[in-house]
Amino acid sequence: ASGRIGVRVAGGSLTVDTALLSTDTLLVDVKLRTVRVNGVLRYDLVSNAGGWPLLAAGSNAVVYAGGGTPTLTHRASYV
């Protein structure tokens, strides 16, 4: 199913627009500024207005528009 995933926070936003299968894995690393689909770098899928966002402590908005139900996971990063 095709889908659009977006992250919008103060200082920037990031949109990944692609078709993903239920077996695909999309990994967005805002610290390293990488986007991977099934382990392959895919900068061609990225639109980042205002630069790459840095996620703030606490809640951040992640928006999904597309078919199916995505599973979202995250991990903490400390500077």
Image: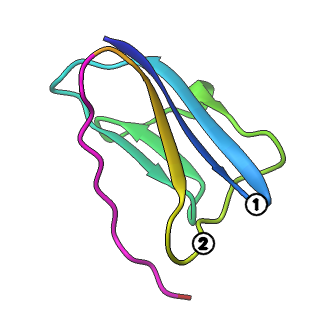
Asked if residue 21 lies left or right of residue 53, the reply is left
Residue at x 23%, y 41% (from the top left corner): 71
Taking 59 as reference, is 61 above or below it? Answer: above
Query: Is 76 part of what is drawn in magenta?
Result: yes
- Circle 2 residues within 10 Å: few <14, some 14–19, many ≥20: few
Amino acid type of the residue that numbered disc 2 sits on in the rendered structure: Ala
Q: Front-most of 59 and 53?
A: 59
* Magenta region, main secondary structure: loop
Query: Is 66 part of what is drawn in magenta?
Result: no
Residue at x 34%, y 62% (from the top left corner): 74
Residue at the limit of the structure toward the left, as seen here: 23
- Circle 1 residues within 10 Å: few <14, some 14–19, many ≥20: few
Quadrant housing the N terminus: top left
Q: Position of residue 35 (x, y in %)?
A: 49, 43
Assess whether mark 2 and mark 1 are in contact (beta carbons under 8 angstroms).
yes
Sequence-wise, the earlier of marks 1 and 2 is: 1
Amino acid type of the residue that numbered disc 1 sits on in the rendered structure: Ala
Residue at x 57%, y 26% (from the top left corner): 45
Q: What residue range appears in magenta?
A: 68-78
Residue at x 42%, y 19% (from the top left corner): 3
- Report which residue position mark 1 lands on: 10
Quadrant housing the C terminus: bottom right
- Report which residue position mark 2 lands on: 56
Q: Secondary structure at mark 1?
A: loop
Q: Position of residue 19 (x, y in %)?
A: 39, 14
Count of residue discs? 2
Q: What's the distance in space between the residues labelled 1 and 2, CA to CA? A: 9 Å
Using the rendered view, name the quadrant where residue 15 is placed.
top right
Q: Position of residue 54 (x, y in %)?
A: 65, 65
Taking 76 as reference, is 6 above or below it? Answer: above
Q: Front-most of 31 and 50?
A: 50
Asked if residue 77 lies left or right of residue 46, the reply is left
